[in-house]
Each structure stands twice: as C-alpha cells, then as structure tokens.
Amino acid sequence: MQGKMAVVGSAETIMVFKAAGVEAFPVTDEKSARETLRKVAHDFPVVFLSEEFAEPLKDLLKRFDEGAYPVVLPIPTGKEKGYGEAFLKDSMERALGVDILFQK
C-alpha cells in the first residue's frame, strides 16, 4: 500500500491525475462515488476526491478521518462551493492547533 495514490471524481477532473500516473476511478454521481471510495480506501493510503462529491460524502469522510489511512483530500474542480478549503483549514487547525494556511 505504500506510496499508492488514487483519484475519484468525474472523468474530466481525473484526467490530469491519470496522466501523472495516479490510479483514476471515474464516477458519475454520489452513489457511485461512495461505492468507489469505499473500495479504493482499502488499497490506497492517499485518495483525492473531487470536491463536488466530497461535501455529499462528508459522513464517510469523517469516518475515514478517525483512522490513519486513507487520507482523503478534496480537490477543486471549478464547481466547488468552498467545502475543500474549509475541510483543509479544519484539518490543519486540528493537526497544528493554529490556522497557518488561510489566517481568516
């Protein structure tokens, strides 16, 4: 499992990751994103997830956050509403005790 990364998201979002050698898993809706994320979580320590699917799956992401792996990181797609930024901010504040990224 060491060093393996995956990306879950819409086909157009994951193309650039696939070109960079990241295992890509295209999904079309919340249901397929949830199923795919559950499957890849067993094999990949780092999973990038399109932000458009991250917010609807926040219950699942919270469960993953309780363990060491997988680390699921929302990625911007141009359709986001700020969920990824808020998620990253909260994660950094919990880990470091201070907001070093956004300072808002």
Image (tube, rainbow, N blue to C red):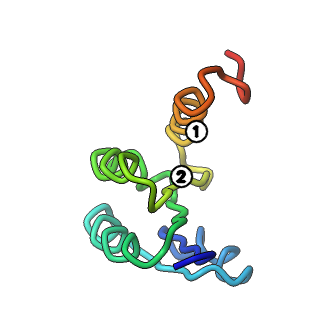
- Kindly identify which numbered label has been placed on residue 74: 2
Place residue 103 in its image quadrant: top right
- In the foreground, 87 or 69: 69
Q: Position of residue 83 (x, y in %)?
A: 50, 38
Q: Position of residue 9 (x, y in %)?
A: 48, 68
- Kindly identify which numbered label has been placed on residue 72: none
User: Who's the residue at 59% across and 68% down the image?
Assistant: 13
Q: For mark 1, what is the residue? A: 88
Place residue 69 in its image quadrant: bottom left
User: Who's the residue at 58% across and 76% down the image?
Assistant: 2
Give the alpha-carbon distance from disc 1 to disc 2, as whole Å: 8 Å
User: Who's the residue at 70% across and 74% down the image?
Assistant: 16
Amino acid of disc 2: Pro
Q: Position of residue 48 (x, y in %)?
A: 55, 62
Instruction: Tell whether label 2 touches label 1 (CB within 8 Å).
Output: yes
Place residue 37 in its image quadrant: bottom left
